[in-house]
C-alpha cells in the first residue's frame, strides 16, 4: 500500500510538469525571420528595417510578454473545471519512559490523498473564464497596436533619414552654386569689372553655404542614430538605404474613401479600440463573476488515507470519505454588496473608455487626413517653385557673366534655388510620412 501511494503522488507531480500546456492556451508566437546580415554592407528597404525592428524592439517584447501572461491566466481559469487533488504525509519519531520501565520509541507515519471538485456555482466559473479570455483579447490588441506603432516609428525614422541625406546632397549642390558665383565675382573683380563688395558678398554667401552643409551632415547623423536606436542598435550604426521611387503613385492613397468613411473604417480596425471593447467585455463578465460569488456553490469531495503506528496490536489503519458540500454565504458584513457595486462601476468606466477612444480615433483620422491633403498640395507647389527657381538662377548667372546683372540678383536667385531644392525634398517626404500617419490612424499600417 505504501508503494502504491508513493507511485500515485509521484505520478501526479510528473504529469503536472510534463504537460506544460494541457489547455492549449499559448497561441501567440514570437516573430520569425530576423535578419542576420552585415547592416553596413546590405542595402536595406523599409521591409527589412521593420523585420529587424520587430525582432529587437524592447517595448514590443514587453507587450508580447503581457500577452503570454494573459494566456497563462486563461489556463489558470480553465483549471477550475478540473478537481483539485492534494497529497499529504507525515512521519515522526517519539519516545517515552515511565519510572521503573524501559524506554519506548515509536515511529508513526501517515499519508492522505484528498480531492475536491466544484460542481455548480451559478455560472461564476464560466464567467471567470470568459473574463480572462476578454483580457487576453485586450492584451493581443494592445500588442497589435504596439506592432503598428513600431512599424510607424521605423517608417518615419527611415523617411527622415532619407530626407536628411537628400537635403545634405542639396546643400552640397548649393555650395557648388555659391562657389561658382564666388569664382565668377572674383574673376570679374580681378579684371576690374566689379567692385570689391561684389566679391565679398559672394564670398560670404559661399562660406554660409559651407556652414549649411555641415549642419545638414549633423542632421543626417542625428536621424541615423534615431533609426538605429529604434532597431535596438548602436547610434553609430550606418545604413545603406533603398530610396522609394519619386512617382505620383507613391504619394497617392490606395483608397478613394472620404474622410468620413475613413473615420468609420478606423472604428472597425483600430486595435486600440478593439482592446478597449475587450476590456469592456471583461468588465461585464466580472460583474457576473462577482454576483455568482455571492450565491451558493456545490462541490464534491473525497479522500483516502493510510497510517501506521508500528504496533503489533494495531499495525496500520486506512480511512476513506466521500460527500457533497453546499456553501451558502449568509452574511459578509455587506462586503458582497460593495463588491457587486464596484464591479458595476468598473463596467461603466470601461464603457466610457470605449466612447472616449472612439472620439479620439475620429479626431486622429481627421487631423491625419488634413495633414496628408496639405502635404500633397505643398509637394505640388514645391515642384513648380523649383522649376522657376532653376530657370531664374540660370538667367541670373548668364546675365552676370555678360555684365548685365549684379551680384545681388545672382546671390538672391541662387539662394531661392537652394531653398526650393530643399523644400521639394522636405515636401516629398512630408507626403510619405503624413500618408503613413493616416494609414496608422485608420489601423491599416
Image (cartoon, rainbow, N blue to C red):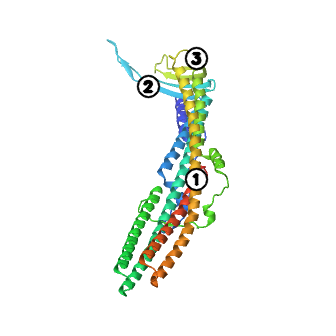
- In this orientation, does residue 27 appear? no
Q: Residue at x 34, y 15 (%)?
A: 97
Q: Are marks 1 and 2 in contact (CB under 8 Å)?
A: no
Under tag 1, what secondary structure? Answer: helix
**Disc 3 marks which residue?**
328
Under tag 2, what secondary structure? Answer: strand
Looking at the image, which residue sits at the far front? 404
**Disc 2 marks which residue?**
91
* Nearer to the camera, 207 or 191: 191
Query: Given this view, does label 3 or label 2 mark the residue nearer the observer?
Result: 3
- Identify whether 361 is placed above or below 290: below
**Disc 1 marks which residue?**
370
- In this orientation, does residue 190 appear? yes
Location of residue 152 in the rendering, given as x and y in whole percent from the top left corner: 54, 54
Q: Residue at x 65, y 57 (%)?
A: 254
Query: Given this view, does label 1 or label 3 mark the residue nearer the observer?
Result: 1
* Nearer to the camera, 187 or 233: 187
What distance separates the C-alpha of mark 3 from that of mark 2? Answer: 37 Å
Q: Mark 3 Cα within 10 Å, few/some/many (few <14, many 20+)? A: few
What distance separates the C-alpha of mark 1 from that of mark 3? Answer: 61 Å
Location of residue 304 in the rendering, given as x and y in whole percent from the top left corner: 56, 23
Q: Are marks 3 and 2 in contact (CB under 8 Å)?
A: no
Amino acid at each position: 500500500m505504501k508503494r502504491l501511494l508513493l507511485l500515485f503522488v509521484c505520478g501526479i507531480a510528473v504529469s503536472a510538469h510534463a504537460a506544460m500546456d494541457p489547455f492549449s492556451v499559448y497561441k501567440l508566437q514570437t516573430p520569425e525571420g530576423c535578419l542576420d546580415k552585415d547592416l553596413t554592407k546590405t542595402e536595406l528597404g523599409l521591409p527589412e528595417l521593420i523585420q529587424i525592428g520587430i525582432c529587437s524592439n524592447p517595448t514590443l517584447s514587453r507587450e508580447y510578454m503581457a500577452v503570454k501572461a494573459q494566456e497563462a491566466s486563461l489556463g489558470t481559469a480553465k483549471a477550475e473545471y478540473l478537481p483539485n487533488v492534494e497529497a499529504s504525509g507525515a512521519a515522526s519519531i517519539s519516545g517515552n519512559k515511565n519510572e521503573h520501565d524501559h524506554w519506548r520509541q515509536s515511529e508513526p507515519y501517515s499519508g492522505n490523498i484528498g480531492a475536491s471538485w466544484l460542481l455548480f456555482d451559478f455560472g461564476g466559473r464560466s464567467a471567470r473564464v470568459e473574463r480572462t479570455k476578454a483580457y487576453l483579447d485586450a492584451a493581443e490588441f494592445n500588442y497589435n497596436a504596439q506592432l503598428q506603432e513600431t512599424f510607424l516609428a521605423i517608417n518615419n525614422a527611415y523617411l527622415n533619414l532619407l530626407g536628411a541625406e537628400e537635403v545634405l546632397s542639396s546643400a552640397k549642390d548649393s555650395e557648388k552654386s555659391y562657389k561658382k558665383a564666388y569664382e565668377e565675382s572674383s574673376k570679374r573683380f580681378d579684371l576690374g569689372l566689379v567692385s570689391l563688395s561684389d566679391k565679398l558678398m559672394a564670398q560670404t554667401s559661399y562660406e554660409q553655404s559651407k556652414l549649411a552643409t555641415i549642419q545638414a551632415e549633423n542632421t543626417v547623423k542625428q536621424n541615423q542614430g534615431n533609426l538605429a536606436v529604434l532597431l535596438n542598435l548602436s547610434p553609430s550604426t550606418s545604413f545603406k538605404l533603398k530610396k522609394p521611387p519619386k512617382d505620383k503613385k507613391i504619394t497617392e492613397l490606395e483608397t478613394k474613401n472620404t474622410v468620413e468613411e475613413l473615420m468609420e473604417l478606423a472604428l472597425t480596425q483600430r486595435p486600440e479600440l478593439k482592446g478597449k471593447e475587450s476590456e469592456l467585455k471583461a468588465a461585464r463578465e466580472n460583474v457576473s463573476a462577482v454576483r455568482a460569488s455571492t450565491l451558493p456553490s456545490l462541490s464534491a469531495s473525497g479522500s483516502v488515507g493510510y497510517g501506521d503506528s508500528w504496533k503489533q496490536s494495531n499495525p496500520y489503519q486506512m480511512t476513506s470519505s466521500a460527500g457533497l458540500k453546499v456553501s451558502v454565504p449568509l452574511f459578509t458584513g455587506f462586503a458582497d454588496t460593495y463588491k457587486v457595486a464596484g464591479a458595476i462601476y468598473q463596467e461603466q468606466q470601461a464603457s466610457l473608455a470605449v466612447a472616449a477612444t472612439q472620439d479620439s480615433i475620429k479626431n486622429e483620422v481627421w487631423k491625419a487626413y488634413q495633414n496628408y491633403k496639405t502635404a500633397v498640395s505643398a509637394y505640388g507647389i514645391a515642384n513648380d517653385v523649383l522649376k522657376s527657381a532653376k530657370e531664374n538662377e540660370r538667367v541670373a548667372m548668364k546675365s552676370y557673366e555678360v555684365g548685365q546683372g549684379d551680384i545681388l540678383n545672382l546671390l538672391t536667385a541662387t539662394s531661392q534655388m537652394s531653398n526650393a531644392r530643399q523644400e521639394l525634398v522636405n515636401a516629398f517626404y512630408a507626403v510619405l510620412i503624413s500618408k503613413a500617419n493616416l494609414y496608422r490612424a485608420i489601423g491599416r499600417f
